[in-house]
Image (tube, helix red, strand yellow):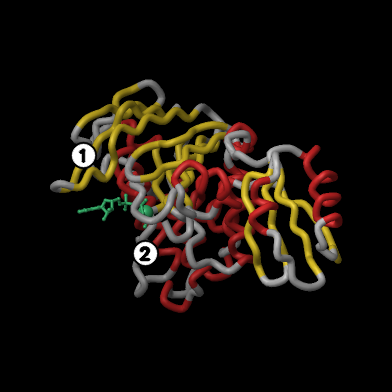
Amino acid sequence: MLVARNLYKAYGPLQAVGGVSLDAGVGQVIGLLGPNGAGKTTTIGMLAGLVTPDQGEVRIAGKPFGGDTSETKCLLGLVPQELALFDELPAGANLDLFGALYGLNGKRLAMERERVFALVGLADRAKDKVDTFSGGMKRRLNLAAALMHDPQVLLLDEPTVGVAPQSRNAIFDNLEALKAAGKTLLYTTHYMEEAARLCDRIAIMDHGKVIAEDTVSGLLRLAPVESFVVIDLAGAFGRMAELQELDGVMEVSVSGAALRVGVRGMEMVGPLLTWLAANGAVVEHVRTERPTLETVFLHLTGRTLRDA
Ligand SMILES: Nc1ncnc2c1ncn2[C@@H]1O[C@H](COP(=O)(O)OP(=O)(O)OP(=O)(O)O)[C@@H](O)[C@H]1O
Ligand SMILES: [Mg+2]
């Protein structure tokens, strides 16, 4: 449904996007996960026809995408990272404006407006000016605006930034409904939990390139540890260097009175606890944590998603 081949975009000496290819089928949600400045918005811009690629090609429903005048434009909806709403206008007038941009009028326009208002749960606020809305409500209206012409492909650029958990869940329910209705979604975020929950496949971006692309479970297999063992200790433990050298122990960190030990395989957990007990550690509590996409990102880049 949405295919990008080898997209490049430079701003002066800066290669914002350096050879990105993506493929999203009908009813699929593809995630673009990466830290600030990774090139996500620039990629979305090229997919939406707003940024002209230096190289590469975008196809939508098998047709080359020619920008503004192209009929393929109607297949595409964009939820931009920066809110694109008129604060001084009522919510309903905002939606009418976006509908009109896609050639809707009369009964069809009114019908679509009611449909998307119901979808994002803002029908009772239709007459209120956008500047009276909370941040989360503005985000939901921003999504509604992109859905007025019922696009087959939806590009979402950080649609939940700055949104409180309740509104965030509401947006997620909307996106899950769109996916169930067979829409194709490209979802950009630097929240790995969101990407893991919603996306069929995730492309991890860094410095303008896709450094890994797979299903969530496929990406997690790239993590060098199978589990983190978090051990609360009563009292100090002085044999960190030896712990680090144990076979199967990949990494050790300390936070407060807890050790966090990344182990290569679950079979290491028993021997690890035995070794700790034999070496003077008084263990109060033990739990294990699975690696996350953050673990994978850290492994691939040496940095965390948050402060990369
Ligand atoms: N119009 C522009 N002119 C110059 N540089 C730009 C322009 N747009 C983006 N860049 C640069 O390109 C790089 C990628 O930016 P982009 O906005 O695509 O990243 P992003 O992954 O969306 O980041 P964020 O998570 O902060 O939204 C950044 O270094 C940015 O400064
Ligand atoms: Mg961005």
Is label 1 or label 2 in front?
1
| Left or right of 175, for residue 77 | left
For the N terminus, the image quarter is: top left
Q: Which residue is mark 1?
A: 52
Q: Residues within 10 Å of mark 2 (few under 14, many from 20)?
A: many
| Left or right of 271, for residue 174 | left
| Left or right of 53, for residue 234 | right
Q: Residues within 10 Å of mark 1 (few under 14, many from 20)?
A: some
Q: Amino acid at mark 2?
A: Leu
Q: Earlier in the sequence, mark 1 or mark 2?
A: 1
Q: Which residue is mark 2?
A: 85
Q: How far from the left and from the top, in percent, is residue 281?
A: 81, 63
Relative to 118, does residue 250 appear above or below in the rendering?
above
Q: Amino acid at mark 1?
A: Thr
Q: How far from the left and from the top, in percent, is residue 196?
A: 61, 45
Residue at image coords 38%, 51%: 99
Q: Secondary structure at mark 1?
A: loop
Q: How far from the left and from the top, in percent, is residue 126?
A: 50, 67
Decide which of 131, 103 is in the foreground and name it: 131
| Left or right of 17, for residue 253 | right
Residue at image coords 58%, 69%: 164
Q: Secondary structure at mark 2?
A: loop
For the C terminus, the image quarter is: bottom left
Ligand 2 quarter of the rendering:
bottom left
Decide which of 118, 179 is in the foreground and name it: 179
